[in-house]
Image (cartoon, rainbow, N blue to C red):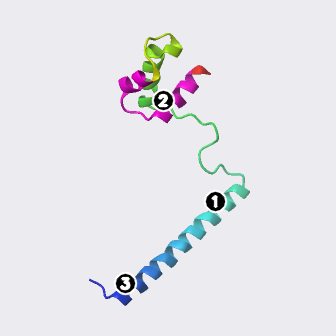
Amino acid sequence: YLPKNRFISHLSRLRKKLMICIRELQRGIKTAKLRGKQVGRPVGAEIVSKKSVSAKQIILQHSKDFGGTLNDADVLKLIGNISRNTYYKYKKELKK
């Protein structure tokens, strides 16, 4: 248990440390970009995982857009563990 004034001073010190860390991080990112380094994931990079591969197989087999018999809502229920946005992203990738 900390008295209120010690707690507030402790909080302000932590806030200052956080701001220093953020500034250093931003400075590092900026210098990396100036040196021509790739910062973050490249635009348009496609991540391949076991989950995405199995979901795409189910979409190809069962979706009406690919010759199956189920509509989008039913295919989503069949897959079960992906969001609606992810489902449509996979579907868009498969149409390419």
| Three-letter amino acid code at the position of disc 1 | Ile
Q: Secondary structure at mark 1?
A: helix
Where's the N terminus, which quadrant? bottom left
Q: Secondary structure at mark 2?
A: helix
- Name the residue tied to disc 1: 29
Q: CA distance from mark 1 to mark 2?
A: 33 Å
Q: Is residue 91 magenta?
A: yes
Residue 13 horizontal/vertical position (percent):
46, 81
Magenta stretch bounds: 73-94
Amino acid marked by disc 2: Tyr
Tell whether label 2 touches label 3 (CB within 8 Å): no
Residue 70, given in percent of the width and then of the height, sits at: 43, 16
Above or below 17: residue 30:
above
Label 2: which residue?
87
Looking at marks 3 and 2 on the same chain, the residue that comes earlier in the sequence is marked by 3
Circle 3 residue: 7
Q: What amino acid is at disc 3?
A: Phe
Marked residue nearer the N-terminal end (1 or 2):
1
Q: Is residue 31 left or right of residue 90?
A: right
Location of residue 30 with respect to 59 vertically, above or below = below
Q: Residue at x 62, y 22 (%)?
A: 96
Relative to 14, 46 lies left or right: right
Label 2 neighbour load within 10 Å: few <14, some 14-19, many 20+: many
> What distance separates the C-alpha of mark 3 from that of mark 2?
47 Å
Location of residue 22 in the rendering, given as x and y in whole percent from the top left corner = 56, 68
